Amino acid sequence: MEFISSTWHWSISGFLIGLVMLSLIYFGKVFGMSSNLRSLCSMTGIGKKVPFFDWDWKSQRWNLVVVAGTMLGGYFATHYLSADSNVAINQMTIQKLQSIGIESPESKLLPKELFGNDVLKSPKMILFLLIGGILIGFGSRYAGGCTSGHAISGLSNFQLPSLKAVVGFFVGGLIMVNFIFPLIFK
Amino acid sequence: MNLIKYLIVGFVFGVVLTKAEAVSWYRIYEMFQFDSFHMYGIIMTAIATGVVGIQIIKRYKINDIKGLPIEILDKEKGTFRYWIGGLFFGLGWAMVGACPGPIFILIGAGFISVGVVLIGALLGTFFYGLIKEKLPH
């Protein structure tokens, strides 16, 4: 069972993600996670006031079921398939993290400095998580998709708009990690 | 119900992203530091698998599960929205180390604080809907 609980190799993981996308195409759907955010907004009935949310979100119920599945998958994998060897990141990365005050993973998926339950007592950290979320929600809808919709689905189908979006993703990510993190974690 | 297959696909996706550690803030940070091939390998293999699958679907005109021809729509033309929207998204992705899929996966895994990220993502989506007509696309 060790090969299941250790970190999955990138080639196997990537292949399976490709298959997830292809299965949804075979089911006559598209692979894209961020559109669920629009559906969730629309469920509140806000479409009466904001036209963008006045659409047939019920036709996207299947995608909300995918979301429910991912949550179960996340629960299952972290509770039954994790091992001490997990999240073995590069030693150089660990040193860079120490310089901004974040401890090494020690097999944890998320750093406690950013995601531990104590952060909910810190207005500064709540704001950090909230702003990160706002950027993700706003950016993915503005760009018309996220990693699944553009990087995987779009690039697999040689879509130039998706390539532009993915370049944007990486430019944004590099700016955050190299220029903004040093300002936040002084 | 027919919906069970979507639950299974989602479950597989959730397990794979967790075991690949693509849901890990550390892995995203490592990727943007160019310190590991891991995340690039995942994304490139997923795309390669997708390219081969889509080519097979197109060449052999494979029908979907209901027997209807599979049509894969092109993305809307445009430039500004993709660059700038992508840039915003990338800032958020690197900041909290999660894209929309992993946000849900991590909440399922029991990380309560990621709920704050989800609230933010919903607010961001709402904000886009509010000012969509005023934005250049």
Image: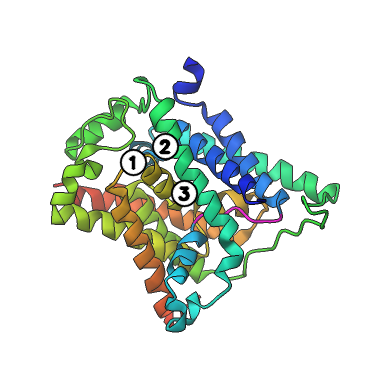
Residue type pointed to by label 3? Gly
x then y, percent, for residue B73: 69, 63
Magenta span contains residue A149:
no
Image quarter for residue B84? bottom left
Residue A34 can be seen, yes or no: yes
Q: Are marks 2 and 1 in contact (CB under 8 Å)?
A: yes
Tag 1 secondary structure: loop
User: What's drawn in magenta, residue-wise?
Assistant: A28-33
Residue type pointed to by label 2? Tyr
Mark 1 vs 3, N-terminal side: 3
x then y, percent, for residue A111: 26, 37
Left or right, residue A184 beside residue A47: left
In the image, residue A77 sits, relative to residue A45, either above or below, namely above
> Mark 1, chain letter?
B
In the image, residue B69 sits, relative to residue A78, either above or below, namely below
> Mark 3, chain letter?
B
In the image, residue A7 sits, relative to residue A123, either above or below, namely above
Label 3 sits on residue: B101
Instruction: Bin the neighbour count of mark 3 within 10 Å (Cα to Cα): few under 14, some 14-19, many 20 and up.
Output: many
Left or right, residue B16 beside residue A182: right
> Mark 2, chain letter?
A
Label 1 sits on residue: B110
Residue type pointed to by label 1? Gly
For the stretch drawn in magenta, what is the main secondary structure? Answer: loop
Calculate the distance from the C-alpha at mark 2 to the C-alpha at mark 1: 7 Å
Label 2 sits on residue: A75
Instruction: Bin the neighbour count of mark 1 within 10 Å (Cα to Cα): few under 14, some 14-19, many 20 and up.
Output: some
